[in-house]
Amino acid sequence: MAINLLPLLHLLLILICAAADHEPPSRSSIVFTTLGRGDYAFDVFTLPTEGPTTPTNELQITDGKSVNFNGHFPNSPALSSFISNQTLIRLRGPQSPPPLELVYVTERNGSSKIYYDALYYDAPGSTRSRSALEIPSRVQVSLLGAVNDQKGKIGVSMKDKPSVVGDSLIYVSNHEDPGVPRASWAAVYSTELTTGLTRRLTPFGIADFSPAVSPTGIWTAVASYGERGWTGEVEELSTDIYIFLTRDGTHRVKVVEHGGWPSWVDDSTLYFHRRSEEDKWISVYRAILPSHGPVTIDSVTVERVTPPGVHAFTPATAPGNKNFIAVATRRPTSNFRHIELYDLVKKQFKELTRPVSPETHHFNPFISPDSTRVGYHKCRGNSIGRKGPLFLENVRSPEPALSLFRIEGSFPSFSPKGDRVAYVNFPGVYVANRDGSNQRQVYPEIAFSTAWDRIREGVVYTSTGPTFATESTEVDVISINVDDGNYKKLTTNGENNAFPSPSPDGKWVVFRSGRSGHKNLYIMDAVNGESVSLSRLTKGPWTDTMCSWSPDGDLIAFASDRENPGSGSFELYLIHPNGTGLRKLIQSGSAGRTNHPCFSPDGKTLVFTSDYGGISAEPISNPHHYQPYGEIFTIKLDGSDLTRLTYNSYEDGTPTWSPLYIKPVDVEPPNDDGPVCNFEDCHWLNQMPNPAAHLVSTKAQCGA
């Protein structure tokens, strides 16, 4: 019997075409640097406000496993009733002490979340010592589910500064794109803990930071630029203090010009910090709102609280407490920030954390509702949890086919096979296997940027010499044989030659040089350097830098300030290696920075770092970041599909694209004995306005 195979073939063809249409995209991975982040190991701790401040009185509240920070002692006795799984809540007898409750930010599984912890212990309430909580009974619950962005992509965002009022959680998130280059995505939201209903309290087109809810829950205060937006500050922000109704964000009004980190003591009194115009010390101020009539800047009374001679910032209050506030300080006699109480009656400071851990930075205090405890976060050190940073730390990606990793180093690049990674760990260039094994230094001097030769196995290019230097500074491009440790100098004039990137055929290297008096791009012989062949690619009184050669050899991407030379504003450009076809790929926004482009393995997309998303938190609330606004983005070569990949308040930079997909799990180093807590405080807090500041040690001037 004859069988007509045409219908079957036709059906098979349809199925094949349909499968091709729905074939999942190829998977890939991006690795980047976050300055200092691998050493944070933050946990939330607490000390009593009365009695001696000794190590035995300090309690560690959070779990010693995650990066935990920016806590809040809730003032809601029914908070545990909002936890959906009531079996987690332990029932105790009438004589058992209540749990120590905390709402805080935690970074785990590669993204920030807001958690509720309740610690139960059997010791009497008067003996809440470290030993009483060594093996606590803990309830730990995430308070927020994933919130997708406007495009419906995976709900990745920064969550920060949580507080609870009634049945609602108030916090910052940056998941909504304002659609304006260099505008902050940070906004304040309210989520009902019982229903999950979320409401945006910040008007669209405006960014709010550091929300604080008044004791009654009626008002929320924020630090905000209002409609004028971020102007590019990377130190103390020039924000103002606004208040609005917590229930819906209405009745918004500016109450203080120039101020940050607000904190209420009652519904008419709040504290904040600002730098004094007269003596330049960062101090805490008090704003008293009128009890009758309209609330305006003119009707609000502002008075200075902490005296000059010490930087005092990020104030914390407790409901109705007129006696003291808690502040973080930087004193001329200390290289570290510490938490202190300031007596509002006696006008005196009382040290809290320095007697306990004098050489550790302490951040962002908060006070319990009954004023008996002060919380803060600090690095937990070597004694608890991991002893060293991860080699590759997985960061949750908004793109399912793309895995993201922080590397413990800077300027990473992968070998053509994807089995090895080179990176800078100042000083020196290092190479390791992708799993973190076989780490070794291959060049001992100061260097920055790395790029593997795509033909000669084991050859890495870098630039050696000072960073952020002038055109005439001695910086040279070298090639390193990572297998035998030999290196060759490829440039000869020493005039700021940097950021080498080899062509895919291994014949040429494009790099940045200041030899003309301006930093432009040049191409030289990849093996023997400029002594054999050198040509100029770009020319002009501006800076062209951070170049990357495409995998097909047809394009070179680079960053340039040619639209406004010397301004510090950089955009991304593309050019053919023969000097034709110059075009701008992305506009950074007014005075913006878009830097460090790198091509995807298929050559269709660029990854880069940028302040396109503005700033996400007050810089003073974090450790030091040179540029506390960099996030990782990708964009297609036609300028479409701009995608934000990282969401935090840190500096993310120097990204690279791996030729192989890396599973989204942490990569631990073969040994974990590296340093932790090895990060710096904000450098600008080392600036002490009075002559006594000159007594501060050289170490303090460079950052503790």
Image (cartoon, helix red, strand yellow):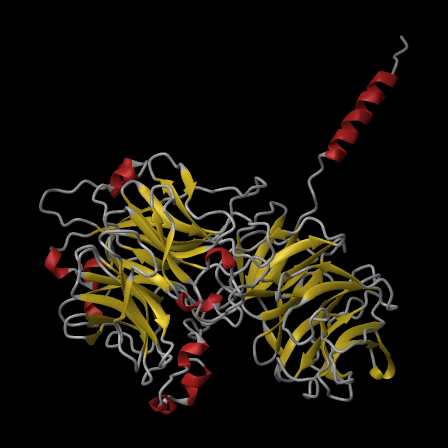
Q: Quadrant of residue 42?
A: bottom left
Q: Does the image show residue 434?
A: no
Q: Is residue 647 left or right of residue 283?
A: right
**Pick the front one: 279 or 167:** 279
Q: Quadrant of residue 451?
A: bottom right
**Pick the front one: 17 or 653:** 653
As drawn, the residue found furthest toward the left would be: 95
Name the spot of residue 554 as percent of width and height, x first.
84, 61
Name the spot of residue 94 as percent of width and height, x first.
10, 43
Q: Does the image show residue 650?
A: yes
The quadrant of the picture occupied by the N terminus is: top right
Q: Is residue 533 above or below residue 79?
A: below
Q: Is residue 608 above or below residue 346?
A: above
**Pick the front one: 209 or 409:** 209
Q: Is residue 73 left or right of residue 129?
A: right
Q: Is residue 652 left or right of residue 573?
A: left
Q: Is residue 187 above or below residue 562?
A: above
Image point (69%, 71%), residue name = 564
